[in-house]
Image (cartoon, grey):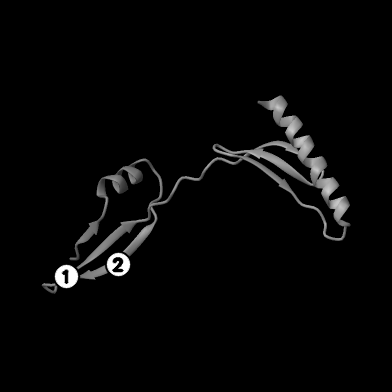
Amino acid sequence: MKKIEIKNEKEVLNTLKSGRIVEGRLALVTTDDGSVFIEFVAYNRQHKRPKDRLIIELEHGWLKESAKRMKFFCSVKKTLETPLIQLAMQSDMNVAMDVLKIEH
């Protein structure tokens, strides 16, 4: 009969008792004295962060709010001439700034 060693045993057992699945690594470990046992190490999964809240969808991008940041994105085709690109970006930035004034 082989011995199974579980690292963070309490956390793994609590997770299993709550009905969730535990993902991890199962390995065959040989000690210095020649004994062999099976070791299970659970993966330390990070919680997924909440999605950013869309404040406004712009003509060429968007303005979003995350927990720590305000995010502005603008994407314009390279086929346009430089003054038109600047105008489109400035227009989107002005709209985003106006909405931000109203929101906060």
Q: Quadrant of the N terminus?
A: bottom left
| Apparent side of residue 76 relative to residue 71 in the rendered image (left or right) | right
Q: Specify whether residue 58 is in view.
A: no
Residue at the outermost bottom position: 34
Q: Which residue lies at the image location 16% right of the left edge and 70% below the top edge?
A: 31
Quarter of the figure with residue 72: top right
Specify few, some or many for label 1: CA neighbours under 10 Å numbering under 14, 14-19, or 20 or more.
few
Above or below, comparing residue 41 to residue 13 in the picture: below
Q: Amino acid at mark 2?
A: Ala
From the image, tell me which residue sits under label 1: 31
Toward the viewer: 101 or 67? 101
For disc 2, the neighbor class at 10 Å (few under 14, some 14 to 19, many from 20) is few
Whether residue 65 sits left or right of residue 9 in the image: it is right
Front-most of residues 32 and 12 = 32
- Picture coordinates of residue 86 (x, y %)? 82, 49
Q: Residue furthest front?
A: 83
Dot label at residue 27: 2
- What residue sits 85% from the left and 46% below the top? 87
Q: Image quadrant for the C terminus?
A: top right
Secondary structure of residue under mark 1: loop
**Mark 2 to mark 1: distance in Å?**
13 Å
Q: Nearer the viewer, residue 23 or 57?
A: 57
In the image, what residue occupies the spot 23% across and 60% down?
A: 4
Image height of 31 relative to 65, above or below: below
- Residue type marked 1: Thr
